[in-house]
Amino acid sequence: MTKAFNDMHLIAALLSYGFQPSDIDTTDRTRQRYRFPSDVKKSVWLIDNGKVVSSEIDVSEVEEAYSTEKLMFLPNYPNVLRRTKYAIISKKHEDNDD
């Protein structure tokens, strides 16, 4: 089973923690959807009651931590975000050239 996301910042956070997409749906150029296996757990850093803690969680739990501003961003996040943006924009331009 997979969970799909189109929020580029969340996708970059997942990628920075080592989650790998099982598929990237590019049928809609403006809303690419990255699908991640929902049963894979990774160790991520969270803010819990004012303390930074490590926790083994899946992509749905990462999404929850991200949306409640409890997810810590790793130092590689800006570079991963830049690469993710480039990949999405490149695909849009590639499709426009057809």
Image (spheres, helix red, strand yellow):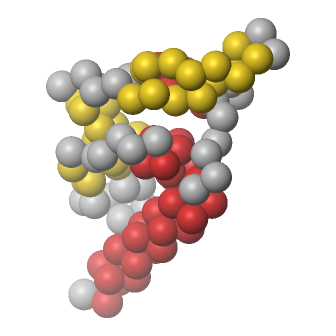
- Residue 87's quadrant in the figure? bottom left
Is 97 displayed left or right of 74 in the figure? Answer: left
- Residue 3 pos. (x, y %): 31, 31
- Residue 69's quadrant in the figure? top right
Q: Which residue ends up furthest to the right in the rendered image?
A: 50
- Residue 26 pos. (x, y %): 28, 60
Q: Which residue ends up furthest to the top in the rendered image?
A: 49
Point 71% across, 23% down: residue: 52
Can residue 73 be seen in this snapshot?
yes
Can residue 63 be seen in this snapshot?
no
Is 88 displayed left or right of 3 in the figure? Answer: right
Is residue 72 or residue 95 the one in the foreground?
Answer: 72
In the rendered picture of this protein, how many numbered marks are placed on residues?
A: 0
Position of the N terminus, as image quadrant, is: top left
Q: Vertically, is 21 above or below 59? A: below
- Residue 85 pos. (x, y %): 51, 66
Is residue 87 or residue 79 the one in the foreground?
Answer: 79
Point 30% across, 46% down: residue: 20
Q: Vertically, is 71 above or below 50? A: below
- Residue 98's quadrant in the figure? bottom left
Point 63% across, 60% down: residue: 78
Point 28% across, 27% down: residue: 40
- Residue 15 pos. (x, y %): 43, 48
Q: Vertically, is 78 above or below 48? A: below
